[in-house]
Image (cartoon, rainbow, N blue to C red):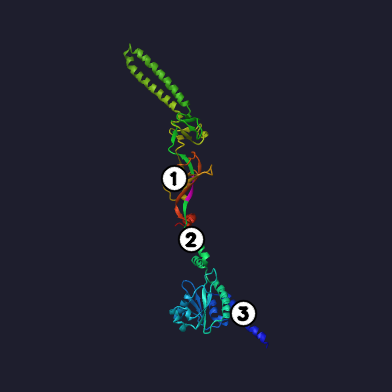
Amino acid sequence: MNPLSSSGSDAARPLATLLHLLRRARDAESEHVLGFVMVNETINLLPYRQAALWRGGPLGRIVSLSGLAEVDATAPHVQWLAAVCKVLPASMPLQRVTAADLPPVLAADWGEWLPANLLFIRLEQPGIQADGALLLARDAAWSDYELTLAAELAHGYAHAQARFAPERSWRDRVARLWQQGKSRRRLLLLLLVLACFPVRLSVLARSEVTPQEAMLMRAPLAGVIERIEVQPNQPVTAGAPLFSLDSTVLAGQLALASTAQDAAAESFRQQAQLAVTEDKARLEMASEQARLEQRRIETEYTSRQLARIHVKAPRDGVIVFSDRNDWLGRAVAPGERVMQLADPGRVELTAWLPASEAIHVAPGSKLRLFPNAAPTESYDAVITRVAYRAEVGEDNVLAYRLYARFSAGQPLPRIGQMGTARIYGSWVPLSYYTLRRPLTWLRQWVGW
C-alpha cells in the first residue's frame, strides 16, 4: 500500500464528511430532522461526548440533545444549558468555553453537567430570524483545525435552518440595525429626529378677494333692465348713473294719471261754478275735490316711481358685478341685487376649505394667498371668522367658508382676484404630516 495515497485519503476524509453533513442538512424534511442531524451526526466530523441545539430569541430554549428523541424543558440539565447559552456573548460566532468563562453561579455546576471543554457554535443567517447555537462538549481541548471545520459547518447548518424559520419582525430588524455599527445607529437616530421634527400643518383652498361691507345696489321696483351705464370693476363717484329700468310701462301709467288728474280738475272747476247758484252742486263739489286730490296723489306717485328707475351711486367706490350682457333685458324683482358698490381700500379674502381636508382653524389663524394671475406675489392674511357648517360651492365641493383680513403694511390685491390660499394650522411632527392623508383614507375605508 502506498503511504502517500493513504495520507491523502486521511486528509480528504474530513472534507468528505463535511460535505456529507451539509447535504444531510439541506435534505432535512423538517426542523426536527435537521436538529437530529446536528446533535447526532456531527460527531462524524467533530468527535464529542455531548451535543445540544439551542434556539435563540426572547424565550431561548434547548430543542435537541444528543442521544434523546425528546427534550424535557423542565429538566435541570436542560435549564442549566439554556442559561449558559444566554450569558455567552453574541458577538463571537465561534468560541471555546470552559467553566472559567461563566459566572460563578453557573460555573459551580459545570462539572455535574458537562465535560471540561465546550465548543459554542452560533448559528445565525443575516436577515432571517433563525438564530441559535450548537453546543459540542468533550474532555479534550478543541484544536484550531477543528474550529475551521466547525465554522464552515456552522454556515451550512444556519443556511439549512433558515428554511424553517419565519422572517424577522420589524422590531427585530430595527434592533439588529441598532446593534450593527455606529453608522447604522446614527442613521436610525437621524430618521427618528426627522420623524419628530416639528412642521406647520397646512392645506390648500380655493380663494377670492371680496369687498368688505359692500353696498348692495338693488332693483328699486319690478321691471326689465334697459341700460347698464358702468363696466365691471369701474371706479365711480357719488351720483354717477349705474343702471336704468325700462320706462315704457311707468311712462304710460304717468300719462294716464296726468290725463285723469286734468279731467278731475276740470270737473271740480265746473262744480265750483255751479255751487254759486245751486245747493246740489255745492254738495257734489266736496266729492269732486276728493277725487281731484286722489288723481293728484296717483300722478305724483307714478312720477316718483318713474324717477327711481335710474339708479345712481350713493358714494364713491368700485362697481362689482359679473358682465353687462348678463343683465341687459333681464327681468328683475323688487329688491333683487344687480351689483355691488365696494370700497377698494376695504377688502377681505374669502376661502373655501374642503371638508375632506379640514384642519383645526380658528379666528387668528394665518394664511397666505397666492394669486393665479401673479405667480410671483403673495399676500398674508389672518382669519377673522369661520363658517360652522360646510356648504356646496361653485365647483360642487363640500367646503367651509373662511373670511380673512389682509395684514397691514402690504399692498392690497384688487377685488375679484382669484387664487390659492395656504391655510396654516398647528405644529405637528413630520411623521404625522406625511401620514395624515393616508391615515385619513384608511380610517374612512376601515371605519374606525
In front of the other: 122 or 215: 122
> Disc 2 marks which amino acid?
Leu
State the SS at label 2.
helix
State the SS at label 3.
helix
Position of residue 74 measured from the top left corner of the image (x, y, whole percent)? 44, 78
Q: Of helix, strand and loop, which mostly describes the magenta segment?
A: strand
Position of residue 161 measured from the top left corner of the image (x, y, whole percent)? 54, 73
**Camera-side mark, 3 or 1:** 1
Alpha carbons under labels 3 and 1: distance apart:
81 Å
Instruction: Give the residue at mark 2.
Output: 192
Earlier-in-chain disc, 2 versus 3: 3
In front of the other: 277 or 189: 189
- Span of residues in magenta: 202-206
Instruction: Give the residue at mark 3.
Output: 15
Residue found at the very far right of the displayed protein: 2
**Camera-side mark, 2 or 3:** 2
Question: Is residue 205 in the magenta section?
Answer: yes
> Disc 1 marks which amino acid?
Val
Q: Which mark is residue 211?
A: none
Instruction: Give the residue at mark 1.
Output: 382
